[in-house]
C-alpha cells in the first residue's frame, strides 16, 4: 500500500520536477564551467604569477624548455587538480554522512577521521620507518576507519538516542585523545616537525602519483555514491520510512560508511586534515537543489571542488610568499556556518 | 539520610585525606625530574642546607612549577564546577566550550605584538599577560553567550556553539602562529597543547592574589550556585535575581579560566572531570563540591605534570597532553551514560 502511494507521489513529483530537472542540469553544467575557470585562475596565481594564456599553452602545447610551462606541469597542475579531487571527496563523504545519520552536524572532520589518520600515520612513521608512500596511505586509511568506528560506536552504545550534539562531543573527545597520543609519540621520537607539517593540512605535497590514486578513488567512490543515492534519499527521510519501503537499512549504512571511509581516507592521507568542507558544502547544496541525493551527490562534488580550489588559492595569496594552511582558511569559512547550524539545532536535514 | 552535620564532617574528612595525598604527591614529585634528588637532600634543601645545585633546581625551577600546577588545577576545577552549575550541563568545561581557546588566542596575539621570545618576559609583560588572557576569555564567553542566546540558553546549543567558537579561534591562532619566527612558533605550539611554562616565583605572585580572590568569591557564592543549578524557575521562586547572579558567577568562572590559561595554556577536560568526581563523593552542594573539586583538580594536574616530566624522559610531555589522555576516556564514559 505504502509502496503504491509512494509510486503515485513519485509520479506526481516527476511531472512537477521535469522543469526543475532541466534547471538543475543547467546549474550543474554552469558550476562545472565555473570550476574549470577557477582551476585555470588558481594555476596562474602563486609565488610567480603566470598569464592565463601561458596556462593554456602549458596544458595543450607543452614545451619543456619554457620554465613557466614546467612550473605548471610539475607543480601547479597536480596541486590544483588534487585540490579539486580532495574537495569533491570531502564534500561527498560529508553529504553521505549527513544523509545516513540524519545529523546536520555530521562531517568527516568532526567525526574523528582526521585524528585517527594522524595517529596511524605517526605510528607507521615511528615503528615501521621503511614504509612507502602507498603503505603510509593505507595506514592512515585504517586509522581513519578506526576513528569513525569508535565515534559511532560511542554513539551506538550510549544510552538514549544519538543526538547530533552527542555525536559531535564524542568526536571531540576521541579527536583530542588521538591528538594527545599523537603529540606525545611525535615529541618523544622527535617527529614533531614532520607531524606539524602534516597537521597544518596543505596541498603542497600533492604530486602526479598522488593525483592518480586520488582520481581512481574519487571516480569509484563518487560513482558508487551516485548509484546508492536513491536509497540514501529514502533513508534520509527516516529509518522507519526506509524500512517500511523494504530497504535493507543496515546494508545501505554499511556501504555508505565504506564509501565515506575510502573518500576521506584518501583525502586525509594526501592533504592532511582539512576541516569543514564536508560540513558546509552539503548544506549549501541541499539549499540550492533540495534533498534528493541523486542531485545532492554530484552537486556536492562540484561545489566541494570549487570551494577547496578557491581556499587553496586564498591560502597561497593571503600571506605570500608563505603559505597559510588551507585548513585554517576552510575553518574561517566554515565556523560561522557551523555556528548558524548549531543555533538552528533540531532542524531537519 | 545524611544530615547537614554528617555531610560537613564527611567533607572535612575527605578534604583532610585529599590534602594528605596532595602533600605526598608534592613531596614525591619534588624528587623526580630530569635531575633526581633524594628525599633526604630535598628536606635538607628546604630547611636551607642543600647544595647550590639542589637549591637552584628545587627552589627556582621545580617548586614554582609545582605551585603553579596546584593553582591551575584548583582554578580550572572551580571554573568547571561553576560552568556546569550555571549551564545545567554536565559536559561543560572551559576547554570544551571554547573559553580557553579565546584566552589562548589573546595570549598568542599578545606574544605576537610584543614579538619577544616567550622565555624572557619583562616584568611589565608578566602583569599584562594574565590581563590579556582574561580579556580573551571574556570575549570568547561573551561571543558564546550571545550566539547561543535564542530566547534563553539551551545547554546543548551552548556546547555546540562553544565547539564552533573553539575551532574558529584555533584557526586564527594557526594563522597568527605562522607569522611568528620559528622559535616562538614551536613554543606557542607546545603552549597551546597545555604547558606550565615560564614558571617563576614572580609569576606565581602575579597570579596568586587574583586566584585567591576569585576562589573565595566563588565559595561565598556557593549558595547561589546551588539555587541556580536547580533551574531558573526554582531559583526565581527562591527569590534569586537569576540573570544578575548568573552573570556574576559566570564572570568568576571565565576570569578563573583566563588566569589558568595564561599560566598553563589550553588544558582541556580537567575542569570537567574534577567537579564530576567531587560531586560523586560529596553530592550536589557547592559549598562542599567546590573545595573538594579544587583539591582533586590540583592533585590530578600535579600528577599529570609529574608523569609528563618523567614517563618519557628526557622528552617532556606537556601536561595538557597527559591530562587529555587520562581524562578523555572519562569524558567518553560520561557521554555514553548521559541521556
Image (cartoon, grey):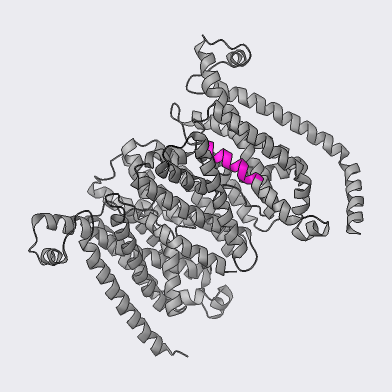
Above or below residue B27? Residue B129 is: above
Q: Residue at x 58, y 54 (%)?
A: A149
Q: Which residues are magenta?
A: A259-270
Percent of width and height locating residue B34: 22, 53
The answer to whether residue B74 is visible is no
In depth, the one of B270 and B244 nearer the eye is B270
Percent of width and height locating residue B218: 39, 71
Question: Hey, which quadrant is residue B13 in on the image?
Answer: bottom left
Above or below residue B324? Residue A137 is: above
As drawn, is B67 to the left or to the right of A193? left
Percent of width and height locating residue A7: 90, 51
Q: Quadrant of the N terminus of chain A?
A: bottom right
As drawn, is A282 to the left or to the right of A4? left
In depth, the one of B49 and A122 nearer the eye is A122
Question: What main secondary structure does the magenta stretch of the protein show?
Answer: helix
In depth, the one of A304 and B140 nearer the eye is A304
Above or below residue A108? Residue B253 is: below
Is residue A145 found inside the magenta-colored segment of the image?
A: no
The answer to whether residue B287 is visible is yes
Q: Residue at x 41, y 44 (%)?
A: A127
Question: Hey, which quadrant is residue B26 in on the image?
Answer: bottom left
Amino acid at each position: 500500500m505504502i509502496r503504491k502511494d509512494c509510486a503515485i507521489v513519485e509520479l506526481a513529483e516527476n511531472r512537477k520536477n521535469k522543469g526543475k530537472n532541466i534547471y538543475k542540469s543547467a546549474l550543474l553544467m554552469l558550476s562545472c564551467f565555473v570550476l574549470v575557470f577557477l582551476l585555470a585562475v588558481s594555476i596562474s596565481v602563486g609565488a610567480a604569477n603566470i598569464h592565463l594564456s601561458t596556462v593554456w599553452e602549458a596544458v595543450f602545447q607543452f614545451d619543456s624548455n619554457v620554465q613557466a610551462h614546467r612550473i605548471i606541469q610539475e607543480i601547479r597542475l597536480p596541486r590544483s587538480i588534487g585540490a579539486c579531487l580532495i574537495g569533491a571527496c570531502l564534500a561527498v563523504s560529508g553529504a553521505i554522512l549527513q544523509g545516513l545519520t540524519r545529523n546536520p552536524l555530521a562531517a568527516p572532520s568532526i567525526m574523528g577521521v582526521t585524528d585517527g589518520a594522524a595517529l596511524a600515520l605517526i605510528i607507521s612513521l615511528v615503528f615501521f620507518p621503511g614504509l612507502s608512500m602507498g603503505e603510509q596511505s593505507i595506514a592512515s586509511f585504517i586509522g581513519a576507519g578506526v576513528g569513525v568506528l569508535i565515534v559511532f560506536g560511542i554513539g551506538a552504545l550510549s544510552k538514549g538516542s544519538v543526538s547530533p550534539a552527542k555525536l559531535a562531543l564524542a568526536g571531540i573527545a576521541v579527536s583530542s585523545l588521538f591528538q594527545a597520543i599523537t603529540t606525545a609519540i611525535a615529541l618523544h621520537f622527535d617527529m614533531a616537525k614532520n607531524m606539524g607539517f602534516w597537521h597544518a593540512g596543505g596541498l603542497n605535497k600533492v604530486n602526479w602519483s598522488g593525483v592518480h590514486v586520488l582520481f581512481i578513488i574519487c571516480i569509484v567512490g563518487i560513482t558508487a555514491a551516485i548509484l546508492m543515492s536513491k536509497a540514501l534519499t529514502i533513508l534520509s527521510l527516516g529509518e522507519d520510512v526506509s524500512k517500511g519501503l523494504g530497504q535493507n537499512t543496515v546494508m545501505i549504512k554499511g556501504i555508505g560508511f565504506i564509501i565515506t571511509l575510502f573518500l576521506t581516507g584518501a583525502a586525509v592521507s594526501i592533504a592532511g586534515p582539512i576541516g569543514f568542507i564536508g560540513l558546509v558544502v552539503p548544506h549549501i547544496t541541499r539549499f540550492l537543489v533540495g534533498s534528493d541525493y541523486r542531485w545532492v551527490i554530484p552537486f556536492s562534488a562540484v561545489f566541494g571542488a570549487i570551494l577547496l580550489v578557491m581556499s587553496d588559492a586564498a591560502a597561497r595569496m593571503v600571506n605570500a610568499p608563505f603559505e597559510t594552511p588551507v585548513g585554517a582558511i576552510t575553518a574561517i569559512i566554515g565556523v560561522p556556518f557551523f555556528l548558524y547550524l548549531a543555533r538552528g539545532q533540531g532542524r531537519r536535514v | 539520610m545524611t544530615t547537614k552535620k554528617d555531610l560537613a564532617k564527611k567533607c572535612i574528612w575527605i578534604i583532610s585525606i585529599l590534602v594528605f595525598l596532595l602533600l605526598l604527591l608534592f613531596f614525591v614529585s619534588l624528587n623526580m625530574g630530569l635531575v633526581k634528588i633524594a628525599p633526604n637532600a630535598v628536606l635538607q634543601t628546604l630547611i636551607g642546607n642543600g647544595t647550590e645545585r639542589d637549591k637552584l633546581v628545587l627552589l627556582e625551577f621545580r617548586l614554582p612549577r609545582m605551585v603553579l600546577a596546584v593553582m591551575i588545577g584548583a582554578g580550572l576545577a572551580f571554573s568547571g564546577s561553576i560552568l556546569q552549575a550555571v549551564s545545567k550541563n554536565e559536559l561543560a568545561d572551559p576547554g570544551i566550550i571554547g573559553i580557553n581557546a579565546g584566552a589562548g588566542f589573546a595570549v598568542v596575539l599578545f606574544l605576537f605584538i610584543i614579538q619577544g621570545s616567550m622565555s624572557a618576559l619583562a616584568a611589565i609583560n608578566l602583569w599584562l599577560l594574565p590581563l590579556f588572557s582574561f580579556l580573551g576569555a571574556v570575549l570568547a564567553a561573551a561571543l558564546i553567550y550571545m550566539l547561543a542566546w535564542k530566547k534563553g540558553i539551551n545547554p546543548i546549543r551552548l556546547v555546540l556553539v562553544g565547539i564552533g567558537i573553539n575551532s574558529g579561534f584555533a584557526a586564527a591562532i594557526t594563522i597568527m602562529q605562522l607569522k611568528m619566527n620559528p622559535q616562538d612558533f614551536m613554543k606557542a605550539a607546545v603552549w597551546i597543547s597545555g604547558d606550565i611554562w615560564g614558571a617563576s616565583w614572580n609569576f606565581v605572585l602575579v597570579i596568586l592574589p587574583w586566584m585567591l580572590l576569585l576562589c573565595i568569591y566563588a565559595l561565598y557564592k556557593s549558595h547561589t550556585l546551588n539555587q541556580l543549578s536547580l533551574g531558573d524557575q526554582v531559583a526565581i521562586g527562591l527569590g534569586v535575581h537569576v540573570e544578575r547572579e548568573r552573570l556574576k558567577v559566570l564572570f568568576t568562572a571565565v576570569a578563573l579560566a583566563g588566569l589558568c590559561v595564561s599560566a598553563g595554556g589550553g588544558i582541556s577536560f580537567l575542569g570537567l572531570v574534577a567537579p564530576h568526581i567531587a560531586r560523586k563523593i560529596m553530592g550536589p552542594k557547592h559549598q562542599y563540591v567546590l573545595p573538594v573539586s579544587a583539591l582533586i583538580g590540583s592533585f590530578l594536574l600535579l600528577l599529570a605534570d609529574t608523569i609528563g616530566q618523567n614517563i618519557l624522559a628526557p622528552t617532556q610531555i606537556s601536561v595538557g597532553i597527559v591530562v587529555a589522555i587520562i581524562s578523555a576516556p572519562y569524558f567518553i564514559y560520561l557521554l555514553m551514560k548521559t541521556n
